[in-house]
Image: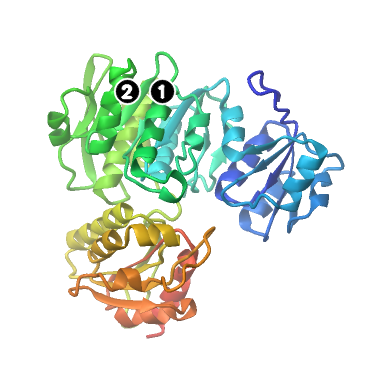
Amino acid sequence: MNTPESGYDLSRVHLVGIGGAGMSGLAHILLARGAVVTGSDVKDSRPVRALRSQGATIAIGHDADNLSLSGALPTAVVTSFAAIPKDNPELVAAARHGIPVIRRSDLLAELMEGSTQILLAGTHGKTSTTSMAVVALQAAGQDPSFAIGGQLNLAGTNAHQGTGGAFVAEADESDASLLRYKPDIAVITNIEPDHLDYFGSAEAYFAVFDEFADRIQPGGHLVVCLDDDNAVACALRAAARGINVVGYGTARAARNHPGIPAAAVVDEPGSPEIQAELTIGGAHRTVRFRLSTPGRHMVLNALAALVAGVLAGADPDKLAEGLTGFAGVRRRFELKGEVHGGAFAGTRVYDDYAHHPTEVAAVLTAARDTVRQEGRGARVVVCFQPHLYSRTLAFADEFATALSLADACVVLDIFGAREEPVEGVDGRVITDKMDPGTEVRFEPDFSAAPRTVAELTRPGDLVLTMGAGTVTLLGDDILAALAGR
């Protein structure tokens, strides 16, 4: 499993934090390719147990001795530099033994070598768009390898070693790791300042997408959303450098940006039934599909997947069938359950990963459209957990505006993740700025959140838990609190 470009020996690989969404997926692929896989994580979990059942040896807790779990030292150690501290005993031991320590993105780049690389990038929508592209290509008779940041609901997995020639993956920009890849087809869904704790400025954040476009292989394509001005600007700069560029989006956006060939266009989305006009390679055709996941942003994501699939040589009608059968991704407007019986019968609870103001606004707009189309007079109630102190402070005004799209809102305290708490900063930096027309509560007690949400909920409402942290754990407790009212 050596690769000539890097010389990494991937015959025995140890993954620190192996239970994470990204790490566990790559571990599955390594096992499928015959590697000896070991790893460690801070706790047991479903991904850890699944990997063990496939032959991985995994320790709970971090210890230098974990490097010898297979009976021999690994040939490479993989880590996520953002999540794993540099003084982790396994990383220290690897350095002492002279074992190469590589990032997850380095490993993914190695695994994609020799494949047609389809990389999905952008500030928002990467996981959903990547998932749609995978499902569409599978329906078209291809069996792509893939690595996704979330779990496909239908397949129940986040990675797969396929028999086809394509490899579909997310290209994460948060630490510039997307610059490790060499895409044949690169999709940029949108570009909006984020991860400023790493980049330092919006300009530096924008620049990484220009560099990503420059990584596209000769004869490859850059695919951008015409409804996003920053993605369009990136595409125009790439085209000026000689890169093949095509766009997708609404008909209005296509008219506004005639300098980018429109490969897939829809009228302004207003229903689950989608009719897309494709113009690729000089041929024009109409394809139709239906989406089960609501939201204008999901329609645009589906168009991106459609264009990427056609550029990869798949039949458009088969791709459309796959999009119609797309069952969603865990934590992307995922239905957690519905209250059966009692005063709150029919009230549904969903969960979503949205943690940036634009994502929050898109999901709440989709939720409002859902209840409006149902015509039952239901409201939208959201329980939001801010993620990172730096992001919350940078976008407090924007979060307040986005969350005000809900009829009622519970804001939890900030989930700091890798950041240390900031004295005097909590969820009230958002709630204090919210529209008075939205009923708002700041709830610092995580365990009390289900009861607080239930107090704001009326029969038949649509309830959303939202955020990138532990808020996802609250769905069942909220359902129980509603059932007990």
Residue on which the image places disc 2: 238
| Cα–Cα gap, marks 2 and 1 | 7 Å
Residue that carries the numbered disc 1 in the rendered image: 214
Q: Evaluate if marks 2 and 1 touch, with contact meaning CB atoms under 8 Å apart.
A: yes
Return the residue nearer the eye: 343 or 350: 350
Please report the residue visible at 22 percent of the width from the left and 38 percent of the height from the top: 227
Instruction: Tell me if residue 216 comes above or below residue 195 in the rendering.
Output: above
Which corner quadrant holds the C terminus? bottom left
Please say if 102 is above or below 385.
Answer: above
Q: Quadrant of residue 425?
A: bottom left
**Residue 167 x, y percent position in the rendering:** 51, 29
Mark nearer the N terminus (2 vs 1): 1
Quadrant including the N terminus: top right
Residue sitting farthest toward the bottom:
485
Apparent side of residue 177 relative to residue 55 in the rendered image (left or right): left
**In the displayed structure image, the side of residue 177 where residue 54 appears, left or right:** right
The crowding category of the residue bearing disc 2, from other C-alpha atoms within 10 Å (few below 14, some 14 to 19, many at least 20), is many
Image quadrant of residue 267?
Answer: top left
Q: Is residue 57 visible?
A: no
> With 12 as the anchor, is 406 left or right in this view?
left
In this orientation, which residue lies closer to the viewer: 4 or 285? 4
Q: Amino acid at mark 2?
A: Ala
Q: Is residue 53 left or right of residue 387?
A: right
Residue 449: x %, y % from top left:
42, 77
The local secondary structure at tag 1 comes to helix
